[in-house]
Amino acid sequence: MGKVVLKLGDDISTDIIYPGRFMATVLPTETPQYTFADLPEFNARLKAGEFPPGSVIVAGDNFGCGSSREQAASGLKGPDLVIVARHFARIFLQNAINLGLQVVICPEIEANEEDELEIHADRVVNLTREESFAVVPLPAARQAILVAGGLVAYTRQRLLDERK
């Protein structure tokens, strides 16, 4: 269960998530400090560690559009946020999966900041509104990468399994 800490609309670009002026910073341990830097109040709360792991950002269509910068996904992964969106931009979605960022495709999601959400494999339940919304499941291969914690962890585990 997680609380919605930020509600966004459609077409949230990677430049909004992780502004281009910080592109020189690529270490996953450093990228979270610049996530949503142009939303200063939210950025300050994020840097202060105000949001517990599993806190949720809800967005509309085309979340992560624009450039293919991986920092947008790593900046969200650092504080262990969950992104529930109606639709994700293709490259952002793959970057998020590769990094192990929990993403949920939920085309009909309705939620406001402070709403409590319960995320299941097949639905998102908004406990505040007492409503349930269907989830578009990720293909099995992508889901396996997410469950493993990202592509590096998935590949490492597969290699170890092959040695047995």
Image (cartoon, grey):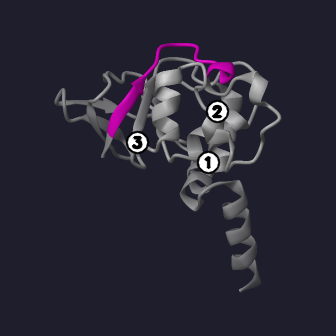
Left or right of residue 103: residue 67: right
Q: Is residue 135 above or below residue 6?
A: below
Asked whether residue 103 is in view, the answer is no
* Residue closest to the far right: 24
Q: Nearer the viewer, residue 111 or 124?
A: 111
Q: Nearer the viewer, residue 164 or 155?
A: 155
Classed neighbour count for the residue bearing mark 2: other residues with Cα under 10 Å, few (<14), some (14–19), many (≥20): many
SS state under label 2: helix
Query: Residue 118 occupies which quadrant of the picture?
Result: top left
SS state under label 1: helix
SS state under label 3: loop
Asked whether residue 51 is in view, the answer is yes
Residue 60 x, y percent position in the rendering = 47, 18
Residue 143 x, y percent position in the rendering = 56, 50
Give the Cα distance between marks 2 and 3.
16 Å
Pointer 1 or 3: first along the chain = 3
Query: Residue 117 occupies which quadrant of the picture?
Result: top left
Q: Nearer the viewer, residue 17 or 117?
A: 17
Left or right of residue 140: residue 163: right
Q: Circle 2 sits on which residue?
A: 34
Residue positioned 41% across, 36% down in the render: 56
| Type of amino acid at the residue the image marks with label 3 | Phe
Q: Circle 1 sits on which residue?
A: 142
Residue range highlighted in magenta? 3-16
Left or right of residue 26: residue 141: left
Residue positioned 68% across, 38% down in the render: 94
Q: Circle 3 sits on which residue?
A: 51
Pointer 2 or 3: first along the chain = 2
Give the Cα distance between marks 1 and 3.
27 Å
| Type of amino acid at the residue the image marks with label 2 | Tyr
| Type of amino acid at the residue the image marks with label 1 | Arg
Classed neighbour count for the residue bearing mark 1: other residues with Cα under 10 Å, few (<14), some (14–19), many (≥20): some
